[in-house]
Amino acid sequence: MPRAQLQYLTDELNKLREQNLYQRLRVLETEQLPVSRFDGREVINLSSNNYLGFTTHPKLRERALEAIRKFGVGSGAVRTIAGTMSIHLELEEKIARFKHVEASVVFQSGFTANAGTVQAILGREDVIISDQLNHASLIDGCRLSRAEIKIFPHKDLDACESVLKEIAGRNCRKLLVTDGVFSMDGDIAPLPQLVELAEKYGCIMMIDDAHASGVLGRNGRGTVDHYKLHGRVDIQVGTLSKAIGALGGYVCSTRDAIEFLYHRARPFLFSTSHPPSVAATCLAAFEVLEEEPQLIDRLWVNTRFFKEGLKKLGFNTGASETPITPVIVGDAALAHQFSRDLFAAGVFAQGIGFPTVPEGKARIRTIVTATHTQEELTRALDILEGVGKKLKII
């Protein structure tokens, strides 16, 4: 029985159960693969961010094992005390070269990279101009900074400029920040126009490129490379946890900006650094991105095939332009029922509702990978059709 002080949490969980919104964690019992075993059931996995299949790539496996043999299993401390290892610096130099920037710093997660950076570079006298659908880590970083936050409707450039005009005369730092690929809708930011606005109104331009890393641009260099905007985006945040296949996040910027984060970014200052095996895995991943571009080509072939299939069946896939393809159903309880019925039929695609997405826009979120076969995707489409018709979604 819960203590009386915590009874309200039990009450809230019971409300979720009554509303058919309660979700329990699915347990993965195999490697992260296109067809995986969750909760004892073999299912086509459409819920993984493992875009290129790097979680099981043989080169990444071997490099992780080599690093354990050479450096052990942990770094033993935070970076500023005794936890900066040569392999961490090697990874950061590799990322900086890959992204065509002066320097980079690796954080323990993409979430801490975003939140720690915004919190560090701004204060209560400053202003942040942020897309309505930016990732939660950016939202939390904005709040932690104590800066004034101004939200513009998703990808609404006119509204964004109206905000910038409104604050143009203020003597403060201004940060214009956007996701590169939006994680729930799969659409791409209008970065060229945002960069022009940032330059016109004297803003720091920042992009969270988590879902574009390894997906967009040459060899997966991201949204900045996709739009050929090198040198015009002040801060780029990426992830090591999605297409790279391991764990962590990174920030790319000028050398001085990175040095400043060494001194002021709280996750960097107060969290133990990556295990050497993770750093080695990420190093290998960036090498594979350059050596095996066919993986990204395959990812996009699969993406186009699956999107076309969903649209032919009559599903609402919103504004998606990338491997993230939502199937929007509106009602949250229906989305979760859709997800459960799909799982029972052999497809794992999670239901997502408020507060992750706005009320009335609940969906299942699908992601295809380079390692899915077209036979697997065809089977998934057949299952989606059958369950979708049963629930009268299509």
Image (cartoon, grey):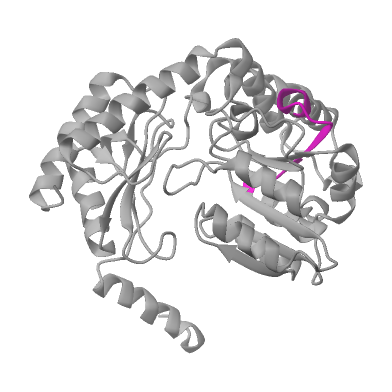
* Residue 320 in picture, x, y percent from top left: 39, 41
Quarter of the rendering occupied by the N terminus: bottom left
Please say whether residue 100 is one of the residues in the magenta stretch. Answer: yes
Task: Count all numbered tags in the image, as a single digit.
Answer: 0
* Relative to 61, residue 203 above or below: below
Furthest residue in direction bottom, as rendered? 4
Q: Nearer the viewer, residue 47 or 274?
A: 47
Q: Nearer the viewer, residue 194 or 112?
A: 194
Name which residue lies at 68% across and 44% down. Answer: 196
**To which quarter of the image does residue 187 belong?**
top left
Name which residue lies at 73% across and 31% down. Answer: 276
**To which quarter of the image does residue 59 belong?**
top right
Name which residue lies at 88% across and 37% down. Answer: 255
Please indicate whether residue 116 sits to the left or right of residue 359 in the image: right
Q: Nearer the viewer, residue 201 or 367?
A: 201
Name which residue lies at 72% across and 23% down. Answer: 98
* Relative to 157, residue 209 above or below: above
> Which segment did they paint magenta?
96-110
* Residue 250 in picture, x, y percent from top left: 71, 40
Please say whether residue 241 is one of the residues in the magenta stretch. Answer: no
* Residue 168 in picture, x, y percent from top left: 76, 64
**To which quarter of the image does residue 193 belong?**
top right
* Residue 347 in picture, x, y percent from top left: 25, 38
* Relative to 280, residue 352 above or below: below
Residue 65 in sight from this viewpoint = no
Residue 310 in sight from this viewpoint = yes
